[in-house]
Image (tube, rainbow, N blue to C red):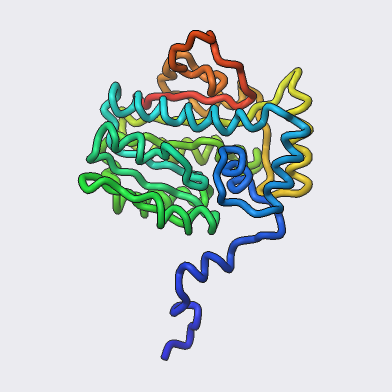
Amino acid sequence: MTENPAATEDPAAALRRRIDTLRPHTARIWNYWLGGGDYYEVDRIAGDRIRELHPAIGEYARADRLFLGRAVRHLVTEAGIRQFLDIGTGLPTADNTHEVAQRLAPDARIVYVDNDPLVLAHARALLTSSPEGRTDHLDEDLRNVDSILERAAGTLDLTQPVALMLLGVVIFIGDEEDPYGMVRRLLDALPSGSHLVLSHTITGPGLSEVDEAVRFWNERGVPALTQRTPEAVARFFDGLELLEPGVVSCSRWRPEPSQAGEPQEVALFGGVGRKR
């Protein structure tokens, strides 16, 4: 008999105990906006209220997901990347990183990192791998850089190029926590030829609806958000070879040709940079 009851607790039960159903959570609201079903009533209410404050907010989730797909396809087909470290996974939907990558390169390896219990519960059930590749999931926080790298090395060969995916996650790191330093430490551990894929909600003149939606969220939801200007988002790519068209609205990063013309801009900017 162990003297530590927690050591014998079912992992799924331990995850369920960590889920807070009384306060809205950004990962669940994002899933709601994407048309998923992995959210609670508190998330739906908050998501609808945010959409009232800023009606275009639902397009951010779609734009971010499409940006992810286009970036991963480029990295696999044009850059030859076969390894992905995806931090801030979010709840699984359609065309997750491993699905896009392994359709093109079945031997691709992906490590997902998130610390939200509902995300982890679903990830372990849904984010499976092709037979030739491998998919792993880590219960970690972006702030724990050393632990992430140490554990990711069990699946990824960190002497070979890796795509570091940070979509909509550094927004949860306040300026006082040195988010630029965190990203730099992750990149410093990766070899030449690695890439950074990052997206971030922006603030600036003419975006009062966005600012109001963020204020509403920070008063009620978790985790809190830190907005940044497009110039501040671009700083995450300092020292990297920034791929065209640079740090732009996610909807306008190499969009698919359309007779409708250029996609509408959203206040969610992203870019892809290569480590020299």
From this view, report whether residue 235 is shown above or below residue 162: above
From this view, report whether residue 76 is shown above or below residue 172: above
- Specify whether 221 is left or right of 270: right
- Specify whether 46 is left or right of 173: right
Q: Residue at point 44% right, 24% down? A: 272
> Where does residue 120 sit, x and y in percent of width and height?
48, 56
Q: How many marks?
A: 0
Q: Residue at point 34% right, 27% down? A: 75
> Where does residue 57 sit, x and y in percent of width and height?
67, 31
Q: Residue at point 45% right, 74% down? A: 10
> Where does residue 166 sit, x and y in percent of width and height?
49, 37
The quarter of the picture where the C terminus appears is top left
- Specify whether 153 is left or right of 235: left
> Where does residue 35 sit, x and y in percent of width and height?
57, 40
Q: Residue furthest bottom?
A: 1
- Specify whether 46 is left or right of 170: right
Q: Quadrant of residue 52?
A: top right
Q: Residue furthest left?
A: 132
Q: Residue at point 61% right, 51% down? A: 39
Q: Quadrant of residue 83?
A: top left
From this view, report whether residue 22 is shown above or below residue 234: below
The quarter of the picture where the N terminus appears is bottom left
